[in-house]
Image: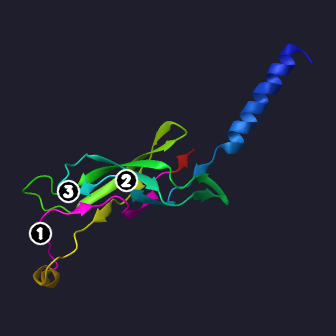
Amino acid sequence: MTKKTFILTAIASCVWIATSFAATIPAGTTLVVRTVDNISSHDRVGKTFTAKLDQDVAVNGKAVLPAGTKVFGRVETSRGNRRSSNPLTVNLTSISIGGRTIPIKTDGAFQLEAKPNTARQLRTGVSVGPFRVAPGTKMQFRLAQPLNV
């Protein structure tokens, strides 16, 4: 075997191995995450937070993103401005895979709402004051675009 043939064979093998591990997660796939950071209804819009996948994401029966994979999100709306009555909504923005951070886009921001604390708040359906989303809170998002991993 000549040096040139050996190099071409090695390159072809590397390409084959790389493509056999690559996968595309289709748009519409549900990502279930658990928060790592606190998120507050009074956080400013644009604040980022960290979460981890709560369950494996599989394509054609093969897990391509294992549970525990880090994901990052962003506060889309909040009551960060004292005059604002917006609900707290968040979206995922990126995922960390093999030391790389890959941007992602999710559909329809996840809306977090405070639970009424008093009988009056329960009757009127309005809760006031800040609330926090504790670490470990489970949330679901849907991919808006395919994700190549």
Q: Position of residue 76 (x, y in %)?
A: 27, 53
Figure label count = 3
Residue bounds of the magenta highlight: 125-145
The residue that label 2 is drawn on is: 36
Q: Earlier in the sequence, mark 2 or mark 1?
A: 2
The residue that label 3 is drawn on is: 78
Q: Nearer the viewer, mark 3 or mark 2?
A: 2
Q: Position of residue 123 (x, y in %)?
A: 14, 85
Q: Is residue 139 above or below residue 46?
A: below
Residue type highlighted by circle 3: Ser
Q: Is residue 2 left or right of residue 90?
A: right
Residue type highlighted by circle 1: Val
Q: Is residue 109 left or right of residue 124?
A: right
Q: CA separation, marks 2 and 1?
A: 25 Å
Residue type highlighted by circle 2: Val
Q: Residue at x 79, y 26 (%)?
A: 10
The residue that label 1 is drawn on is: 128
Q: Residue at x 23, y 55 (%)?
A: 77
